Image (cartoon, helix red, strand yellow):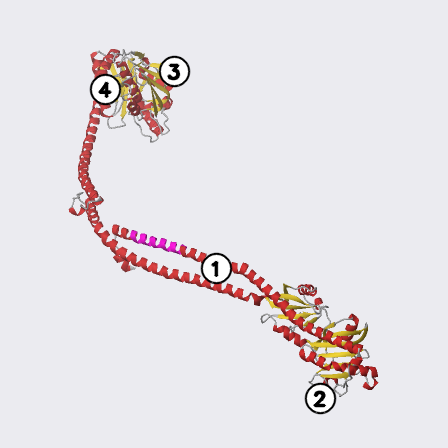
Amino acid sequence: MKKIKDVMPKGLAGKLVRFVVIFVFLMGLVFFIMSRIQVGQLKKAVRQEGEKSSDLIEGEYSQSMDMINKESLLQLSIWAADKTDDEFWIIDHDMRSLGNQVADIYKHPENYNRIPVHGPKKENAGKFVLQALYPGDPADTAPETVEMLERLANLEPMMAEMVEGNEGYTLDLYIATLDDVTLAMDMLSDGKYDENGKLKEYIPSSRPWFQGAVATGDMYVSSAVHSFFYNMNEVVYGYPVYVDGELVAVLEASTALGVIERKMSERNIGSEGFSILVSKGGQLVCTQRTDGELVMREDMAEDIRGSVNPGLAELIDTALLGESGVDQVTVDGKEYYAAYAPLNTIGWTQITFASVDELTEPTNKLLETMEDSNDDMLRTLSNDFRFHSILLIIGLLAFMQFAIIVVSLLAQKRVRPIQKMTDAVIDFVGQDMAFEMKDVYRTGDEIEELAESFDVMSRKMKEYVAEIVENAAEKERAKAEMEAASQIQFKMLPSIEPDYHGKPGYELYVAMETAKEVGGDLYDFYYLDDDHLVITIGDVSGKGITAALFMALSKQKLKAEMILHNGNVAEAMDAANKRLCEESADAMFVTVWQGVLTLSTGELQFVNAGHMYAAVKRDGGDFKIEPDEHCMLMGGLDFINYKVNTTTLKKGDVFYLYTDGVTEAHNDAEELFGDDRFLAALNENSNATLEELDKTVRKRVLEFADGAEQYDDITTICFRYTGLES
Amino acid sequence: MNITKQKDGSRLTVSIEGSLDIRTAPDLSKALEGELDDVDEVYFDLGGTSYTSSAGLRVLLKTFQVMEAKDGRMVLKNVNEDLYDVLKLSGFVDFLEIEND
């Protein structure tokens, strides 16, 4: 990091480099985000396509597979049932053929020779041999029965052929007479003996097949039964033989269930498939189940519909109606397709079960494979993207490095004039305000313009500075002159001391306070002669030096005309007004109160030319504003005839004259001091000395203004008539 | 202070609102500059004028002088009591035309 910091250019060039770095970085970021989005969309598309295929397979494909499965299962089931039924049909056919022969022998015994028959001999075990079985002692057998047995023995070859030719399915064939003598063809000669070596007593009429055949009058098929002679379960057939409507004998045949089961199991579907055989009465005849709902019943006569689940029971119901079909059922909690088909010969049904899982396994496997392939593709996409991202980042970093170097070089070259100029400008500010145009700034672009501007600016600055210095000097000079003028103006005004103090007939007090260096207020007092004192107060409109000049002019004219007109104040002011109108510029005017006090009599003749009314204290009372004959102010209109006011003062009467700076003093709320406050201030102690009176007024004005700037001069003249001692 | 000017043929009406004192009088003076050349009558509507000092008076006087010189008229309108007192004090009131609505 430290290294990069050292390499990074400073100042403008650095900014440029940083800008480029940020720009490249942002470009890379945008590119990265865009490719991220595209990969995302691609992934989404792949995922959606995969899901679509899966849905298709799960939906339509598996549905059609299901249909194919069910259809082929049904066909197989019908075929298997036919195969099983074939065996029963053969037995049925054989027995009917044998029955016809037996009937013929009973009908025409004379056509058959007598062939002796013997009881079972142990040495014949394992060979198909015809054996005669008697219910009791063979000697007790009726001779006509014996004769008939010997004639029936002619059927031995046929019976042997039937049993041997249908090996496995036909275990044995019996012909039983009505007096319980049996002619048996089987391989079990030794089985007829009990463990004591005594012949077992066999009573055919007590056997179910005998009774069944007699009861139905036609072929009887038992459901599963336990064999009398064999240690096995079997299905037994009984067939009655009639001659002219009379029962003469009953035939028996049997089939070992094991054989049927084996044959059926050869036609099972899948490793989990099995099939069962259900007899007309709902008894389970054959099954390959070794436990659960469809295991062989202990009581083989039990109707299994009472003990299996309702779905399966319903299916068996339907199947036993002789129909064929396929449905989905549960056996021992597992799903199976069950296809049923009738065994037409005997009215049973064979049901073939195939595991749903097993049948749909290929479809599921296909789905899994597809999902795996989808996942693979997504993984590949992600990996590719990651790889490309890393490449992109490396590329960006490399490009950034390159950009930094190039831009640094370029920027330093471009920025060099600016740096030089910056140094020059720093010098310019810090030292002599000199900026010199140099060749290095001649870049032909904004830098050159900037340099030229600096050049111009530096020259102008120098000029301005010179000017400012000059102006400042000028101002100082003006200020000094103003001060001088102020002093001159002040000196033009008379002072009480020493000539007007302690003189007989009056007391006089005057005060002036200017708002600026030179004021526009004026006052004057002088003797015309020993008995006549002229008192003047005036206020020039405007401020500053022009007002000061006009004030000086006014004072001079007023006095000159008073002297010229020998104290006739009205005439003097008429004349002075004309002079002032001539001299006035820009409507400058002056308000004037001018009076002549005759000290011996107290008579006061005065003209008020637009000036404030005097506040007068008479007969020891309070000060009052005393209205007078007012005339036009001076310097405005040149045709005025001033009118004189005449009043007589008594000893102790006081005249208080003032300029409008008193009553028009204002506070911050723009309220005026006004006549009422003015009189109140005068009357606080109206008998005080003139100086104290004036100071009280000024004090109250200051308090009232409370720091608000006063624009006007305040000038006051106050005189008390004291009378001459006569 | 707020100055509104309205020229109606040869008559100029100037309405002044607020205080006409030494601080604001130059504004009025400036507002009138050049306006008086082609008018015969100047009306100052002082209905909204609260106060005038000698500086304001000076502007009025100057206008009056200009109008006098060319035989024109200057009329003050809606002069309130305080204002009238000031005009009276100056003696100016004897020469002025004052119209109150």
Residue A139, x across and y down, in percent: 82, 86
* Cα–Cα gap, marks 4 and 2: 179 Å
Which image quarter: residue B80?
top left
Q: What element carries label 4?
A: loop
Residue A146: say if magenta: no
The circle on residue B100 is 3
Would you call the spot at circle 2 few (<14 residues within 10 Å), some (14-19), or many (20 or more)?
few
Split into 4 quadrants, where in the image is the C terminus of chain A?
top left
The span picked out in magenta is A19-37
Going from N to C along the chain, the mark reached first, 4 or 2, is 2
Query: What is the chain identity of the residue bearing mark 2?
Result: A
Q: Which of A393 and A202 is in front in this view?
A: A202
Q: Which amino acid type is shown beneath numbered disc 2?
A: Glu
Around disc 4, counting alpha carbons within 10 Å, would you say few (fewer than 14), some (14 to 19), or many (20 or more)? some
Report the residue marked by disc 2: A123
Q: Mark 4 points at which residue?
A: A585
In front of the other: B95 or A88: A88
Q: Distance between the residues labelled 1 and 4?
A: 106 Å
How many angstroms separate mark 1 from mark 2 (CA)?
75 Å
Q: Mark 4 or mark 2: which is in front?
A: 2
Give the x, y percent position of residue A689: 31, 23
Q: Mark 1 points at which residue?
A: A50
Q: Do the residues labelled 1 and 4 touch (CB within 8 Å)?
A: no
Going by the numbered disc 4, the residue's amino acid type is: Ala
Nearer-N-terminus badge (1/2)? 1
Q: Which of marks 1 and 4 is nearer the N terminus?
A: 1
Secondary element under disc 1, as helix, strand or loop, is: helix
Q: Which chain carries label 4?
A: A
Q: Can residue A202 be seen in this view?
A: no
Distance from the alpha carbon under mark 1 to that under mark 3? 100 Å
